[in-house]
Image (cartoon, rainbow, N blue to C red):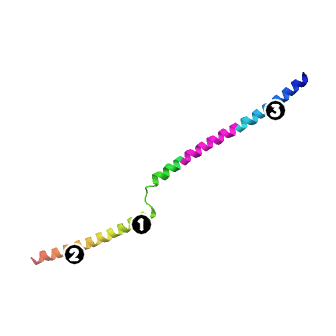
């Protein structure tokens, strides 16, 4: 009976040791799952950010806009110069009258 009791006790100690090891493994896995969840949430934010900036202008778009703006600026300067010239001509015509 003592021999059987010793075997059961040894087996119980092994089971308790395995239980402790399993508990530590489960805690580690739970921690990894939580960490993975945080990383997935971070990826979702990154994905949303990429989606939200996808419609923004590219470098090429900005260059094209700058070129058009430069053409408009040149046109406005010419228009201003023509307007000034017309004012001078109108002023001269008024003096002739």
- Left or right: residue 70 versus residue 89 is right
Q: Are marks 3 and 2 in contact (CB under 8 Å)?
A: no
Residue 45 or residue 4, whichever sits in front: 4
Report the Cα–Cα distance between label 3 and label 2: 104 Å
Residue 54, x across and y down, in percent: 46, 55
Per the image, label 1 sits on a secondary structure element best described as helix
Residue 72, x across and y down, in percent: 32, 68
Q: Is residue 13 above or below residue 59?
A: above
- Left or right: residue 50 versus residue 10 is left
Identify residue for label 3: 14
Per the image, label 3 sits on a secondary structure element best described as helix
Residue 59 or residue 80, whichever sits in front: 59
Residue 67 or residue 7, whichever sits in front: 7
Identify residue for label 2: 85
Q: Mark 3 or mark 2: which is in front? A: 3
Residue 84, x across and y down, in percent: 23, 73
- Left or right: residue 73 versus residue 89 is right
Q: Earlier in the sequence, mark 3 or mark 2?
A: 3
| Category of crowding for the residue at label 2, using alpha-carbon neighbours closer than 10 angstroms: few (below 14), some (14–19), many (at least 20) | few
Give the prevailing secondary structure in the magenta stretch: helix
Per the image, label 2 sits on a secondary structure element best described as helix
Magenta extent: 26-43
> Is residue 35 highlighted in magenta?
yes
Q: Earlier in the sequence, mark 1 or mark 2?
A: 1
Report the Cα–Cα distance between label 1 and label 2: 33 Å
- Left or right: residue 79 versus residue 18 is left
Q: Outermost residue toward the bottom? A: 96
Position of the C terminus by quadrant = bottom left
């Amino acid at each position: 009976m003592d021999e059987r009791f010793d075997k059961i006790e040894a087996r119980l100690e092994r089971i308790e040791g395995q239980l402790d090891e399993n508990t530590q493994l489960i805690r580690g896995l739970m921690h990894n799952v939580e960490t993975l969840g945080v990383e997935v949430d971070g990826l979702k934010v990154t994905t949303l950010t990429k989606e939200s900036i996808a419609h923004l202008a590219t470098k090429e778009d900005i260059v094209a806009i700058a070129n058009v703006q430069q053409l408009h600026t040149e046109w406005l300067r010419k228009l201003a110069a023509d307007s000034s010239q017309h004012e001078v001509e109108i002023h001269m015509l008024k003096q002739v009258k």
